[in-house]
Image (cartoon, helix red, strand yellow):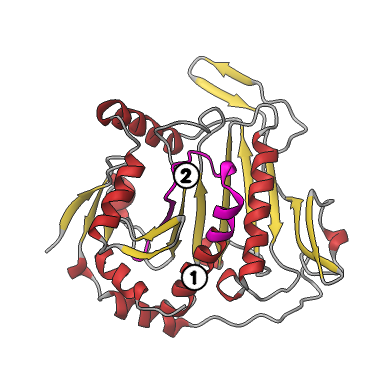
Amino acid sequence: MSEFRQKPTTKEWVIIAPERADRPKDIAAKAAGEGREQPPEYDENCPFCPGNEHKTPDEVYREDADGGWALRAVPNKYAALSSTVTPERQVQRVMVKANGYGAAEVIIESPHHNPTIATMSNAEVERIIRAYKDRYQDIISQEHINFVTIFRNYGPQAGTSLVHPHSQVIATPVIPPHIRDPIYKAIESFDTFGNCIYCTVLEQELEVGDRVVLESDYFLVRCPFAARSPFEIRIIPKIHRASFGDISPEESNDLADVLRKTLRKVYFGLGDPDYNYIIRSAPYGDDDARYLHWYIVIIPKLHAPGGFEISSGIYINPTLPEECADFLRGIDT
């Protein structure tokens, strides 16, 4: 029997309708049957492979290992935004526009062409988390930047155009409504109950336990109560922090292990599906807010929204989050 579920943090509704599709193990089996062609370790035509550094803009961050670079961050060569223009807005009655001011960078995660985070070592993933923090802190401090998002697209269904392992950082002077609206809800909840709604959800998930995928010293991994799509996953810090930029070295190392293990569960359990992951962090000026809590959301591309979902904003999830969490818990990492 289907049911409505409300997200406690945003008050959005989803419909959980497990009778519309197969069970999680069947979805996983179907996804695994699709397969993925394994790319080579090196591609001479790839602009991110060693020897092709001249094909990218000058690097803004670099870590070396074994006599060469292990990770590089470069401005996006085809960025939609630029820091060389002015951010002033122009208002024409109810129409507002501004120059495409902002920042866009690519974090080239490895010199090798074919790994993904699920197949990397902890040390390699720790390097990626360090780069995320460095670029976040540097960009958020720049004048006129108010919002920074870090994300990873994996596979064509997730929007990636290059196979070589990479993440992106994009920063804007504007804060989108779908970012600002949950902040208003978090403030309203804090004013009503006197505490962070994300912390409360975390405590409840730990108590209930049936949506927990894994737990570490500093992080909880769960399938949300009102997940929009099959196998949606959230990684949330146990220590209250509004900004990802404030992550401690201990938390950073722990996150690397947690992220790698979580994506290994997705990789082996779901047959290496395309996915997006996004780091949700407080906008500039809200970095020490008591009502906000940063987190990572992982969305495997296993289900496309239909007309009802697009028109209403109410997503239909054909899987029970509790069953998805139980399935992922059983995947050995």
**Residue 274 horizontal/vertical position (percent):** 50, 69
Depth check, front residue: 32 or 291: 291
Q: Residue at x 67, y 36 (%)?
A: 102
Callout 1: SS? helix
Quick check: can you spot residue 233?
Answer: no
Which amino acid lies under the numbered mark 1 shown in the image of this protein? Answer: Lys
Where is the N terminus found, in terms of image quarters? Answer: bottom left
Position of residue 97 in the picture relative to residue 64 (left or right): left
Q: Is 9 included in the stretch rendered in magenta?
A: no
Span of residues in magenta: 230-254
Depth check, front residue: 127 or 73: 127
Eyeballing the image, is 101 above or below 333? above
Q: Is 252 included in the stretch rendered in magenta?
A: yes
Position of residue 98 in the picture relative to residue 276 (left or right): right
| Residue 294, numbered circle | 2
Q: Residue at x 20, y 63 (%)?
A: 17
Callout 2: SS? loop
Callout 2 environment at 10 Å: few (<14), some (14 to 19), or many (20+)? many
| Residue 261, numbered circle | 1
Eyeballing the image, is 57 above or below 92? below
**Residue 139 horizontal/vertical position (percent):** 68, 38
